[in-house]
Amino acid sequence: MDSLEQSAARERGPTGDGIRAERAGWSFGGDTPQYFDRHVARSVPNYEAGHSLIEQVSDFFVKKDSVAYEIGTSTGTLLRQLAKRHPHGTRWIGIDSERAMIEYARSAQGKAPNVEYLLANACEVDYEASDFIVSYYTVQFVPPRHRQNLIDLIYKSLNWGGAFLFFEKVRAPDARFQDIMSAIYIDYKLENGYSPEEVLGKASSLKGVLEPFSTKGNLDMLHRAGFMDAMTIYKHVCFEGFLAIK
């Protein structure tokens, strides 16, 4: 490959909302945090409604002396909403592996004394005993070879009766359904104002970075970790929320 080809391969293309990324090089670092909330809200159907659902579910598990985690806290928006809903006694810990995201979350925190942020790989955290763990479209970015280990750690961390609530983009059970879901999602993004170049740019940047499992694949992973009680709590085409109780 000559220098011109190498330069083209490294070119950062538009993915929407001011974010640019290389092919197979999507990153949550750099300047992504400042654009992230708008970008993800436009890219994921019912994104803010999902936050509201998580808040409602948290009422059943969070106690005044609870420790609760958000894995992949990004800008901290959801974590701060949960902390505001449960302000008395609960410790809310947001984990993210991107320094830029943690710094942005801390700067946006305001008056939230029951919130703390941890810059760490979620697969390497020494989790405290907890009652509620949430991950909102994050596990899909954990390399498949490490994903089961993360779910195992989450299961071990939870107190008996605690819950793990996570949302994921999911693959369909066969190629025909996958084609349908992919086409509907592309139409959604185009109707939401993204250009074809941005849609293609985002898809290209996520190659090898975003690796969704199927519904069955996610449920199997929960069961292998030890969760006996798990169900789908939300579903919209290729986006799904799972609730697992220890």
Image (tube, rainbow, N blue to C red):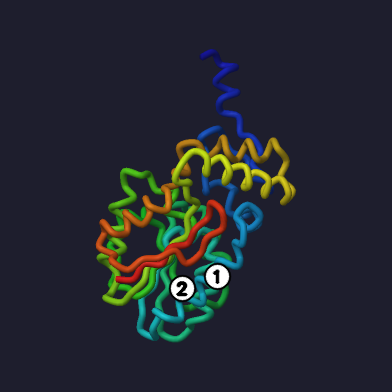
Quadrant that contains the C terminus: bottom left
Decide which of tag 1 and tag 2 comes sooner along the chain. Answer: 1
Q: Nearer the viewer, residue 237 or 205?
A: 237
The answer to which quarter of the image holds residue 44 is: bottom right
Q: Amino acid at mark 2?
A: Val
Residue matched to label 1 = 109
Identify the residue at horizontal 59%, vertical 49% (top origin): 32
Q: Nearer the viewer, residue 206 or 165?
A: 165
Residue matched to label 2 = 115
Q: Amino acid at mark 1?
A: Gln
The answer to which quarter of the image holds residue 229 is: bottom left
Coordinates of residue 215 in the picture (x, y in percent)? 42, 53
Identify the residue at horizontal 36%, vertical 53% (top origin): 121
Pointer 1 and pointer 2: residues touching (CB < 8 Å)?
yes
Residue 171 in the figure: left or right of residue 194: left
Disc 1: CA contacts within 10 A as few (<14), some (14-19) or many (>=20): some
Disc 2: CA contacts within 10 A as few (<14), some (14-19) or many (>=20): many
